[in-house]
Amino acid sequence: MDEKQFLAEYDKRQYASPLLTVDAVLFTYHEENLKVLLVQRSNHPDRGKWGLPGGFVDLERDKTLEETVLRKLKEKTGIDPPYLEQLQSIGNAGRDKRGWSVTAVYTALMAYQDCEAHIDTVADAQWLSLDVVNNMELAFDHLAIIKLARERMRQKALYSIVPAYALPETFTLPELQHLHEILIGKPLQKKSFRRRIEQAELLIDTGEKRSEGGRPAVLYRMKQGSGAYTFVRNLED
């Protein structure tokens, strides 16, 4: 038997396969808080509980896992996230009551304002503060997944300006610094943070300013590709 004949006669149903899904931990920055997008489950198992947006791979529509997660996020937010990264795969016999399952977990960032109008029209989707989420009983193992993604974002905040993808297109340096501080979990020295950002030449001065209760602050936007830049020393140093 050659390979062509083998493949023609191969029956994948001979072997039990795990359930295959994707889950996305989608973060944003709103009201000076880090928030995560949750959806309320309308079907069993765990019907009525809140969990991460995601779902099953569609073998007819999806060519890759990325296509699956982007399709699911588009359904819930109305946009494609500007930053998407695969976190890890998790599989075991206990995480889903329906059977042995594997989920490919992604982290994503987007500005609250970019999808606010869409999410306001979707009854089963909400942005919730992580402080609130940490005290909720979520579906499946989603709380543990969120904690893994939160730690990944902490690491990103130490060495890059990836967190800026959770801000509006234009933002101030105080906003960027505060988001980094939330993710890292400690205050950063203002002068040092500003100097590191400016020396790396990662932002574009828009020439516009916004008043934040005191002296007007300069509005910046990210340069193309600046999310891939990593600092030689972390921003705590």
Image: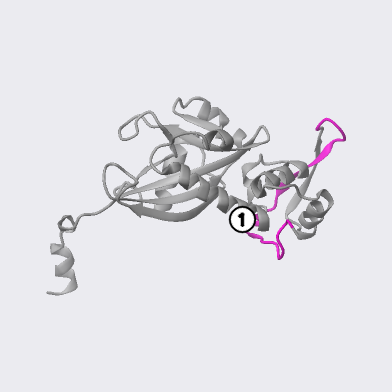
Q: Give the range drawn in magenta.
A: 212-236
> Whole-percent x and y of residue 157?
65, 52
Above/below status of 1 relative to 89: below
Label 1: how many Cα within 10 Å (few below 14, some 14–19, many 20+): some
Q: How is the image coloured?
A: one colour
Q: Which amino acid does label 1 sit on?
A: Gln
**Residue under pointer 1:** 155
Q: Is residue 21 above or below residue 88?
A: above
Along the line of sight, which residue is nearer the eye, 27 or 145?
Answer: 145
Q: Tag 1's secondary structure?
A: helix
* In magenta stretch: residue 218: yes
Residue appearing at x 24%, y 54% in the figure? 17
Q: Which residue is the extreme one toward the front? A: 135
Front residue of 209 and 189: 189
Q: Horizontal and vertical percent for residue 13?
A: 17, 55
Q: How many marks?
A: 1
